[in-house]
Each structure stands twice: as structure tokens, then as C-alpha cells.
Image (cartoon, helix red, strand yellow):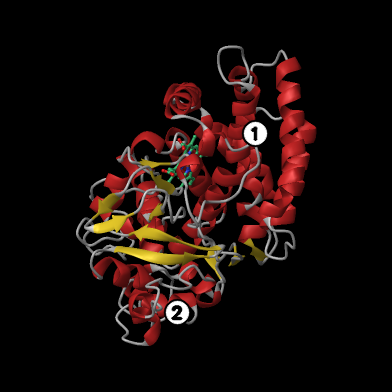
């Protein structure tokens, strides 16, 4: 009998990473070694202008690996791609090159270097755009303040606190036979945890949850980017509160004179609630989907006192943040022999780097015993994720709590899960689960 208690079928993890298994799991995406047009079209389908069209569809988000493999393999591994918003950009796909791009001083995150008709990134109004418009010195100072605030010694207790916050949400679902995990758990939990971490006042928490409900759920009609005005109102109220409050919260500490200016704080709060919040949702939902088909790895994982390395493998394997933020060429340059003109846009593809066989053995397999070099799921270099110290304890608390409450948690019909056709991010849109 296998770990699922089924005497006849092999455990899902035996087949889950075999060629073609992605096809089974993801409801119609082509098998990895297929020679059918979808696989090859990523490269050979480029039009006369040499632009690879439409690689950021829902199917791509669900199973980007065959397309990314073909792009990595086609020299020079740097390709002109169409973006969902229209204008093209250069997609960098190989591990070493992606990592190099993330530390190249001639590739700036500052949109002032965008010069021409390339993709410029998600348009964010001032003052929420600090990460796209500040000079390197200001970004470095801002990051120093955040790093101090998010240092392990400050966030050390966060695992325990996150576990406490999770409990009531899970308890509410006790006795329900089936529910959508994204809707009932993955969307509200990160909102709760980040609200608590920042120390948002209660009315702002409610507004944040209402905002998340209106943009992140499958049936949501407004797109997140269309709700920036209401997001800005919430942030303004939160910052006013932090200036007046005597409380000791992360927000009031960040707002202290000498730390962040009001504009910088607005940018940080915005990114935390708008971008990093979404990646946490994707990580959580992706984790449940991944472990659902790998009961033996799940069982082994739950015996471990420390889940950090398993969380890293989840981050590498899922790569919920597919792309780093856009980089703009400060000067004419070459990336792996590909000329890039000053002002053009470069998109370092973290997901592709994390599945590069030159760096990782059997890269498309999920393996909690993997002993591999560091991945790029949290970026690298000057803009690497400042939330790193926080993500591992929060993810660990979530995984631990989830499976101690529902050890038999399974995704129903995992072959038909729709994925959000994210551009920068990827994650399941809905996840029907059976908790017991
Ligand atoms: C699973 C969750 C998360 C993932 C996968 C993730 C991933 C990333 C990545 C890939 C970058 C680099 C982007 C680039 O080079 O353009 C980044 C930057 C950053 N992240 Fe995270 N992140 C997560 C959660 C968080 C959280 C919870 C916080 C804060 C509490 C956070 C704070 C930051 C900050 C401040 C930056 C630096 C931005 C910059 O300097 O431009 N992240 N993150």
C-alpha cells in the first residue's frame, strides 16, 4: 500500500516529476519533452520582428518550465519577449546570467533610465513608487532601516506569533468537508500576518482584508492595479496614525524621525501590502498543491524540527516570483553576446534560473532532500529580498499549523487547477481542498 492508502496506484510523487507528469497535473499543458508547437513556439514562434509572443498566459503560469527550458537552450538565452502590457523587453533565462544581471551596475531599477518604447514596469503613482524612482544611496538607506527592523532577532518570535494568528482562521473551517484553500486560507492569512507585523490599526486591517477580497479572489472583478486609489487612502490613514501613535509597532518605529520619510514609508507599506503580500499567497497555495501530490515527502517534512531547507526548496521549485523587477540599461551593453541598447528593459527570469540544469540536478523535480546551491527566488545582490528572515518562520508556522490540524489535507482534482496568469508572479487561482 502506498502513502495515500491506495493499494493499486503508485504514490503520486513517483510520477509527479516524470516527463509528462506536469501535463497530468496541470490539466492540459504540454508534456515537457513534447515536440508539439507549444514547446518550440516559444523560440521558433518569434515573429519577423524577432519577438517571442505571448509567453505570459495562464498556461505559462501553470507550467512555465517547458517554455523556459526552450528559451534557456536557444542561444544566447536572452530573448526579446512581448509583455502582457504590450511593449517588449529582454528576458534573461540562464542562472549565471540572471545572477550577474542582478548585480550589474549598468542595469538600474530606476525608471528614469527607461528610454524608448520598451516595457517600463507596472506604473505606480508617487509617492508609492520609491523603489522605482529613488537613487541608489536612498534605496540603500531605506533597505538598511528595513533590514534592521526585519532582522532575525526582531522577527525571531514571528513564527510563534504567526502560528497563533493562523489558528482561529483554521478553526473556523473545522467541520467543512471541502473549501477553496486560496479563498479561505491563502488570501486572509498573509493579510492577518502582515497587518500584525506592521501593527496596522484595526480599521486599516479591515480595509486591507476588504481590499484583498476585492482583488485577489477568483471572482474578483477589479484588477489590483485598478484599485491603487483606494490602496493609497488606506496607506495615508495608516501613516497618519503611525505619526500620532505612542505604540511600539514596526510602523511607528519606521516612521520615527531619522528613519523613513513619509513618502518612503508609503512606498514600503504599499509594496508590503500589494506585492510581497501577493507572493506570500502564491507561496502558501503553491505549497499545498505541491505537497498534496507528494505524501511521502510531506510525511518526512513534518518530522523535521526545522523546515527552513524545505521552504527553500519550495521557493526554488515554485518560484512564485517569476521575474525580478525590470532593469533598465544605463548604457549600451551586451548580455551573453546579445547587444542591449541604453534605455532598453531587461527582465531577469528568476523562475528560469531556478530550473537551470547547469545549476540544479533534476531541476523540475521537487525534492526536500535536495542539497543544492542557493536559488534566486528571493533575488540577489543590491535589491535582494529584505523579507527573507521573515518568510522562513512564517512559511514554517503556516505549514506546521496547517498539517497538524489537517494531516490528510488534499487538493481535489489537482489536474484542473487554474493558475493566475501572473507576469511577475505565479500561483494557483483556486485550490479546492478536502481537509480530512
Ligand atoms: C514568499 C514571499 C516573497 C518572495 C518570493 C519575495 C521575493 C522577492 C524578490 C525576488 C525580490 C528581488 C526583486 C528584484 O531584484 O527586483 C524581493 C525584494 C524585496 N522584498 Fe521580497 N519577497 C517575499 C516576501 C517579502 C516580504 C514579506 C517582505 C517584507 C516584509 C519583502 C520585502 C522585500 C524588499 C524590501 C525587497 C527589496 C526591494 C528593492 O530593494 O528594490 N518581501 N523580494
Q: Horizontal and vertical percent for residue 118?
A: 48, 57
Is 336 displayed left or right of 187 in the figure? left
Is 139 displayed left or right of 430 in the figure? left
Where's the C terminus, which quadrant? bottom right
Sequence-wise, the earlier of marks 1 and 2 is: 2
Residue under pointer 1: 127
Is 420 displayed left or right of 234 in the figure? left
Residue 214 versus residue 192 in the image, above or below: below
Q: How far apart are marks 1 and 2 (CA)?
A: 41 Å
Residue 76 versus residue 98 in the image, above or below: below
Residue found 74% across the figure and 59% down from its top:
222
The label on residue 272 is none
Q: Nearer the viewer, residue 138 or 250?
A: 138
Residue found 43% across the figure and 68% down from its top:
293
- The answer to whether residue 263 of the structure is visible from this angle is yes
Q: Horizontal and vertical percent for residue 209?
A: 73, 45
The label on residue 29 is 2
Q: Which of 233 and 2 is in front in this view?
A: 233
Name the front one of labels 1 and 2.
1
Quarter of the figure with residue 259: top right
Residue found 63% across the figure and 24% down from its top:
251
Amino acid at each position: 500500500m502506498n502513502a495515500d492508502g491506495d493499494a493499486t496506484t503508485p504514490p503520486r510523487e513517483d510520477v509527479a516529476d516524470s516527463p509528462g507528469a506536469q501535463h497530468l497535473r496541470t490539466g492540459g499543458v504540454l508534456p515537457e519533452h513534447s515536440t508539439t508547437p507549444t514547446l518550440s513556439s516559444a523560440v521558433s514562434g518569434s515573429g519577423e520582428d524577432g519577438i517571442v509572443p505571448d509567453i505570459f498566459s495562464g498556461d505559462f503560469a501553470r507550467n512555465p518550465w517547458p517554455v523556459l527550458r526552450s528559451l534557456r537552450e536557444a542561444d544566447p538565452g536572452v530573448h526579446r519577449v512581448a509583455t502582457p502590457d504590450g511593449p517588449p523587453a529582454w528576458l534573461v533565462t540562464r542562472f549565471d546570467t540572471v545572477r550577474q544581471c542582478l548585480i550589474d551596475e549598468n542595469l538600474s531599477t530606476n525608471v528614469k533610465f527607461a528610454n524608448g518604447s520598451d516595457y517600463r514596469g507596472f506604473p505606480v503613482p508617487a509617492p508609492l513608487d520609491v523603489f522605482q524612482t529613488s537613487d541608489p544611496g536612498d534605496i540603500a538607506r531605506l533597505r538598511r532601516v528595513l533590514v534592521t527592523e526585519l532582522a532575525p532577532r526582531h522577527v525571531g518570535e514571528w513564527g510563534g506569533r504567526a502560528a497563533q494568528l493562523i489558528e482561529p482562521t483554521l478553526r473556523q473551517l473545522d467541520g467543512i468537508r471541502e473549501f477553496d484553500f486560496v479563498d479561505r486560507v491563502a488570501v486572509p492569512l498573509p493579510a492577518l500576518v502582515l497587518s500584525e507585523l506592521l501593527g496596522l490599526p484595526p480599521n486599516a486591517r479591515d480595509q486591507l482584508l476588504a481590499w484583498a477580497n476585492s482583488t485577489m479572489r477568483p471572482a474578483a472583478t477589479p484588477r489590483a492595479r485598478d484599485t491603487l486609489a483606494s490602496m493609497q487612502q488606506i496607506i495615508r490613514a495608516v501613516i497618519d496614525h503611525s505619526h500620532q501613535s505612542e505604540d511600539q509597532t514596526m510602523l511607528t518605529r519606521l516612521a520615527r524621525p531619522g528613519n523613513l520619510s513619509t513618502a518612503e514609508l508609503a512606498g514600503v507599506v504599499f509594496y508590503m501590502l500589494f506585492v510581497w503580500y501577493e507572493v506570500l499567497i502564491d507561496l502558501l497555495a503553491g505549497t499545498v498543491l505541491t505537497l498534496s501530490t507528494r505524501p511521502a515527502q510531506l510525511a518526512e517534512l513534518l518530522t523535521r524540527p526545522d523546515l527552513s531547507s524545505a521552504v527553500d526548496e519550495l521557493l526554488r521549485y515554485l518560484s512564485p516570483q517569476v521575474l525580478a523587477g525590470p532593469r533598465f540599461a544605463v548604457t549600451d551593453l551586451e548580455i551573453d553576446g546579445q547587444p542591449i541598447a541604453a534605455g532598453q528593459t531587461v527582465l531577469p527570469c528568476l523562475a528560469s534560473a531556478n530550473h537551470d540544469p547547469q545549476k540544479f540536478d533534476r531541476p523540475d523535480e521537487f525534492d526536500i532532500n535536495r542539497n543544492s546551491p542557493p536559488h534566486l527566488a528571493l533575488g540577489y545582490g543590491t535589491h535582494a529580498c529584505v523579507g527573507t528572515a521573515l518568510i522562513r518562520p512564517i512559511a514554517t508556522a503556516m505549514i506546521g499549523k496547517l498539517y497538524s490540524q489537517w494531516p490528510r489535507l488534499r487538493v481535489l482534482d489537482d489536474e484542473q487547477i487554474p493558475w493566475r496568469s501572473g507576469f511577475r508572479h505565479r500561483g494557483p487561482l483556486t485550490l479546492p481542498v478536502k481537509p480530512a
